[in-house]
Image (tube, rainbow, N blue to C red):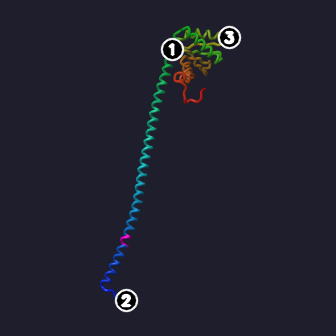
Amino acid sequence: MAARPLNDDEVLSEMNKMVAFIKQEALEKAREIKVKADEEFAIEKAKLVKQEQQAIDAQYEKKRKGAEVAQKIAQSNLTNKSRLRLLHRREEQVQDLFATARSQIVTFAEDEGRYTQFLQGAIVQGFLQLMEPTVTLSVRERDVELTQRAGDAAVEAFTQLSGHSIVFDVQGTLSNTSSGGVKLISGGKRITIDNTLDERLRLLEDRMLPEIRKDLFGPNENRKFYS
């Protein structure tokens, strides 16, 4: 039996069904697109938020480390300045002590009896070191006469100790700013022995400085070896 053609109402009904189907398909497709777009948006948003958070964290960490470094530098500078001030005050105390010692040797040189004994001992020591037949004694101009007497006594002591004779002359060529004492110059003027009070004090300062600092300020915690 041959199919009959659709009438207008049936054609309209079929067309409405097709439109409804297409519309439904379009709505479902639109929903899928929207869901996918929302998912992609959420993923991209999360990614952007994470990147921004990482950037903020990195910036904060950089600033934190910078602040820590600045604080350490400031603390180190403060510590160094405090240490330098302490060292400066300690050095002033040591120099005050040496200045007191220098003033005392000036007073010592004014005591003729003790000073003569010192000159005699210093001259004998120099004679024994030089072991030469002729020696020049260089002293302050005001000490020439005193040194002549001390030198005579030193010659006797030297001869008894060494069995040798010696001749000396005294010259007032030592600076008057000197605290006193004597320089012994060999006959050939090649060797000079400095037995002045200033030189004796300088040598004593160098040798005693570590011990003086230890007595004044206690042991140095940073020093591992002692001579």
Q: Which residue is mark 2?
A: 3
State the mark number for residue 30: none
Foreground of the two, 19 or 55: 19
Q: Which residue is mark 1?
A: 104
Image position, residue 204 (x, y; %): 56, 20
Screen quadrant of the C terminus = top right
Q: Amino acid at mark 3?
A: Gln
Q: CA distance from mark 1 to mark 2?
A: 146 Å
Image position, residue 199 (x, y; %): 55, 19
Of labels 1 and 2, earlier in sequence is 2
Residue 178 is left or right of residue 49, and the answer is: right
Q: Is disc 1 placed on a helix, strand or loop?
A: helix
Write the residue at 68% across / 14% down.
162
Foreground of the two, 68 or 16: 16
Q: Amino acid at mark 2?
A: Ala
Of labels 3 and 2, earlier in sequence is 2
Q: Amino acid at mark 1?
A: Gln
Q: Which residue is mark 3?
A: 160
